[in-house]
Amino acid sequence: MGLILLNFAIGAAVAALLWFIAGRWIVMLLDHVFRGREETIAAEPLAIDDRRVLIGSRAWKRDGPAKFTFNVHLNEQHHLIISNRGRSIVLGPVTRRMSGDDGIYNYFTAGNGDVVRFTRRRSRGSWPMPWEWFRIMGAGRKRGRFVYHRFTWANPTGQQLTLSWRDEQWLYRGAREWIEAYIERIVEMRISKARS
């Protein structure tokens, strides 16, 4: 009986150590298997410049791995065109152009027949942040979780643009609400083919 309890205690200690060390990667893996509930959030205004995409009330980074980078230009009808790895999609008309630190900000809207959707999905689990527990100055983070934002644009030809970002939220000691970390990373950029 004593050997069984010892094996159980060692197994529990190893599992706890693994959770403390690799919790964020375990949660990321579980997020791909057990998808949480998606909620629709505001997708307007829409704008894009050389570094960011403005969707709703937040600007999202465009930089990331080469397979997720895309080019933006206007056609003769002043519609926005996004290109990535040999595929392009025509988005809605540009309604306003503004000059800024990061180039020209192109504000655009959905055209006739376009379907635009912006959703948020939170991780079902969270991971501990033990290295933050011993912070001397300021409130330390207690736990972290991922938040996935997904933007889709489908035009009448059946072609679809999908952009997804993974961000984090942190829970601080003594806090009751999760706080946005604003360390988003683009994790998906896909342009589907039009219907034949």
Image (tube, rainbow, N blue to C red):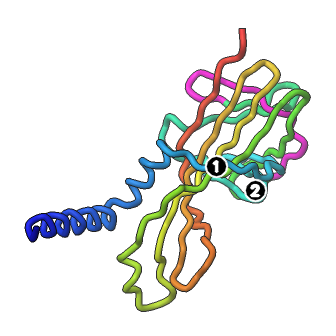
Residue depicted at x 53% and y 56%:
124
Q: Which residues are magenta?
A: 83-98
Residue type at mark 2 is: Gly
Q: Residues within 10 Å of mark 1 (few under 14, many from 20)?
A: few
Describe the element under mark 1 as helix, strand or loop. loop
- In the picture, measured across the screen, residue 85 lies left or right of residue 191, that is left
- Residue 151 in percent (x, y) is at 69, 42
- Residue at mark 2: 100
Q: Is residue 87 magenta?
A: yes
- In the picture, measured across the screen, residue 84 lies left or right of residue 93, that is left
Front residue of 25 and 59: 25
- Residue 11 in percent (x, y) is at 20, 62
Residue type at mark 1 is: Arg
- Residue at mark 1: 37
| Viewport quadrant of the N terminus | bottom left
Q: Up-down: is 172 above or below 109?
A: below
Q: Up-down: is 78 above or below 117?
A: above
Q: Is residue 118 magenta?
A: no
- In the picture, measured across the screen, residue 123 lies left or right of residue 87, that is left
Looking at the image, the residue that sits furthest to the left is: 3
Q: Up-down: is 97 above or below 127?
A: above
Q: Is residue 137 visible?
A: yes
